[in-house]
Amino acid sequence: MVMIPAMQAQVTTDHVFAALADPTRRAIFEHLARDGEQNVRALTARAGVSQPAVSKHLGILKHARLVRDRRTGRETHYSAQPQALKPMLDWMGLYAAFWHDRFDRLESLLKRMDQ
Amino acid sequence: MTEPAASLSLVIEREMPHPPEKIWRALTQGPLIEEWLMKNDFQPAVGHQFSFRSTPVPGWDGVIDSEVLVIEPNSRLSYSWATMGTKTVVTWTLTPTTVGTHLRMEQTGFRSETDAAYKGATYGWTKFIGNMERVVGGLD
């Protein structure tokens, strides 16, 4: 997969969401995060889709910086970069903060309803 | 790009020393909902379309469009939650405990639709939470 360097500069929350929205990609990412570095062949054996499809998924994961690749000779090894999840967790965190605050207000209201 | 998307969800749970019936009222009576969540024209009827309204801020019109999806008195309430081009579903589950109620809120369906929606949503919510903290601080 050919990547334009300029496009790799900006990784947004959207890229991370989009990359993980697909169940096959999520499975590949989870597999790498759990079992460590793998080559495309090993990943294809598990993924249940063709090697070109796995390569395409890896390209999208790489673009979102969820995986990193390392070449040795003719083989490329991929590993998970879980820290790339941070923008997504930050975004969800805003909603979490919102709801925690609303839970506090709900509790305060329930106390007043006693009176 | 129209890949079938799995989605992410957010779960917030809390034990509350109040019976489910009382919490249910706070979750389903418009004037009570307004006291802890937002202005609204909620009605506890499946299919009812309504909106939550907050003060608009730059990047967010302050409106959340919703539809009641599930009403199971004192136990489960679900409505859609659409704003800034993203649509999620908020589901409340009330489970009685020996000391009150286990209250669970699950917001499902976070997914990528467009770049703009997400950038906008992030900006909108940041501003919104900032404003809200000032309002809450002012009340104390």
Image (tube, coloured by chain):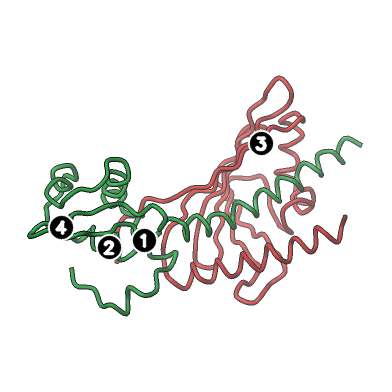
Chain colours: A green, B red
Q: Is residue B98 above or below residue B25?
A: above
Give the distance between the C-alpha atoms of the residues marked 2 and 4, in whole angstroms. Answer: 15 Å
Query: As drawn, which residue projects farthest toward the front?
Result: A72
Q: Position of residue B104 (x, y in %)?
A: 61, 37
- Residue A35 quadrant: top left
Q: Position of residue A75 (x, y in %)?
A: 11, 56
Residue A18: give its label: 1
Q: Position of residue B1 (x, y in %)?
A: 29, 66
Q: Which residue is mark 3?
A: B14
Res A80 seen here: yes
Give the chain of mark 2.
Answer: A
Q: Residue at x 23, y 59 (%)?
A: A69
Give the distance between the C-alpha atoms of the residues marked 1 and 3, in whole angstroms. Answer: 31 Å
Query: As drawn, which residue projects farthest toward the right?
Result: A115
Say what amino acid the circle numbered 3 marks: Arg
Give the distance between the C-alpha atoms of the residues marked 3 and 2, in whole angstroms. Answer: 37 Å
Q: Residue at x 28, y 59 (%)?
A: A68
Res B77 seen here: no
Q: Which residue is mark 4?
A: A76
| Residue in the foreground of this view, choosing between B90 and B128 | B128
The secondary structure type at the circle numbered 1 is: helix
Give the chain of mark 1.
Answer: A
Give the distance between the C-alpha atoms of the residues marked 1 and 4, in whole angstroms. Answer: 24 Å
Q: Which residue is mark 2?
A: A60
Q: Which quadrant is the C terminus of chain A positioned in? A: top right
Give the chain of mark 4.
Answer: A
